[in-house]
Each structure stands twice: as C-alpha cells, then as structure tokens.
Image: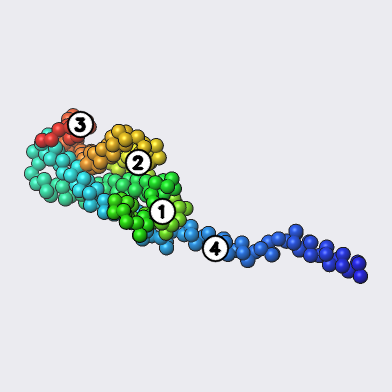
Amino acid sequence: IFTSVAADSKLRSDTIYRCPTAIYSSSTSADTKEEEKRNYIRPYLKQLFLLCRPINFPIVVLFHVLGVHRAVEFWKLTMQPVSTSSSSMLVSLLKEPSIVMVLLSLMLVTSTSMITNDYYDARNGVDVVPDINDENDDVREEYGHYHPLAQGTVPFTVTKTFDSYLYAILLLSSAFVPGTISRLMVIGGAITTYLYTVHLKPKTWIKNISCAALVAMSPITSGLAAWNVLRDGTAAATNASASSVPFALIFNSP
C-alpha cells in the first residue's frame, strides 16, 4: 500500500515539476494570442491615421507648393530668359518624382511629430481623458480633442511600432530628396521633432524657436529641392551663378 502511494505521489510530482507547461499551456497560449492581437497594427489603422493629424496635410502641401513656386520665380529672374510660363513650369516640377518625394518626406515629418508627441504626452500623463460629467467648460474644451492613447483605445506598443515604421519610410524617402541641403533639412526636421517632444517642450522659448524653425523648414526645403531639379535639368547649369546654392531664394523675394 505504502509503495503504491509513494509511487503515485512521485508520479504527480514529476508531472507538476518536470512538465509545468502541460498544466498551464492553455492559459499561457490564451495570453500569448491576446498579446499578439494587441500588437497587431491593422485593427487600429483608422485611429493611427487620425493620430497623424491629417488636418495638417493641406497646410504642408500649401507650404510645399509655395516653396516650389518661389524657386521657379527666382529661376526665371536670375537665369537666361525662359519662354515657358511660370504656371506650366510649376506644374511640371510638382509632377517630378523627386519633388513628390520631398512632399512625402515633409508629410512624414509632420505625421511622426504628431504621433511622437501624443505618445509621450499620454505616457507621461500630460494628456487626460475629460469627464463627460465635468461642468468646467474650459477643461472640456482643452482636453476634449482626440486622445486614443490616453483613452486606452490604442495600445502604446502598437503606436510605437507604427511610429517606427513611419520613421523608417521617412529615412528611405529622404534618400531621394534632391540636393544635399534639402536632404539634411528633412533629416534635421525629423530629429528636431523628436528632441522637441522629449527634451525641448518644457522650455518655452526654445520650444517656440523650434516650432518656428520647423514651420519655416517646409517651403525652404521644397524651394531648394526644386532649384536643384531645375539646375540639373537645364543647360543653364553650366552657368557659375546656377552652380551655387540660391541663398537669395531663402532671404529675399523678387
């Protein structure tokens, strides 16, 4: 009797201590599936797209077109007379693949800055979810805009992964931006947006200067890129004045 009891006890102990996964496999598998589901980006694409603040995209496009337009006007003013009208030159430049890549890079800089800002604000407790029963209109108006991270509708891991993908695409698209200075401005803008969110945001004056620099970066980047396309695609590139960087395009208006 005692031998059978001892053998039975040993068998149960071996089952528990040598094969614990057999006992807890069902719960572990369920937890793993739930974690994989939360880390999957596709169900949250709509929320992630709204985190990019698409309402800002028309402003980015407007600044981009403004920069290309100034490059065209400066080119016609300083280079040999061109029979082509400014509007047709502008349209043809905007259709150039390299100029389209400039616009894509600028939109990615804007999108990544918005997502990174919301990510750190939600993680640090800056963004709060307003109480629907709060009678303070100022609080409701200030915190009533879209905060899916603070509300818990989008996991932090999904947002961080999506933001990393956008930064990777931004790094790839910046390689096709024409002109060294334009390319450096795109990469510098992406770095500045990250530093702004993590380190510069609490410092008022530095924060304002950073925001102003980022806003001014868009038309200047597009203008310098358009200048490089015009210079490389025109016979006037052999002119000495065309081979240098058009700083007058940045500081002066014809």
Q: Which mark is residue 193?
A: 2
Q: Residue at x 28, y 39 (%)?
A: 211
Q: Residue at x 19, y 34 (%)?
A: 250
Going from N to C along the chain, the mark reached first, 2 or 3, is 2
Residue of label 4 = 33
Would you call the spot at circle 2 few (<14 residues within 10 Å), some (14-19), or many (20 or more)?
Answer: many
Q: Amino acid at mark 1?
A: Ala
Q: Amino acid at mark 4?
A: Lys
Q: Where 71 falls versus 34 (above or below)?
A: above
Q: Secondary structure at mark 1?
A: helix
Q: Along the line of sight, which residue is nearer the eye, 72 or 82?
A: 72
Residues under labels 1 and 4: Cα distance? 24 Å
Q: Along the line of sight, which residue is nearer the eye, 254 or 60?
A: 60
* Extreme residue toward the top, this view: 240
Question: Would you say 116 lies left or right of 205 here?
Answer: right
Residues under labels 3 and 1: Cα distance? 44 Å
Q: Mark 1 or mark 4: which is in front? A: 1
Question: Would you say 85 lies left or right of 164 here?
Answer: left
Going from N to C along the chain, the mark reached first, 1 or 2, is 1
Residue of label 1 = 150
Q: Residue at x 11, y 45 (%)?
A: 86
Q: Secondary structure at mark 4?
A: helix
Q: Quadrant of residue 228?
A: top left
Residue of label 3 = 247
Q: Along the line of sight, which residue is nearer the eye, 232 or 3?
A: 3
Going from N to C along the chain, the mark reached first, 3 or 1, is 1
Q: Are marks 2 and 4 in contact (CB under 8 Å)?
A: no
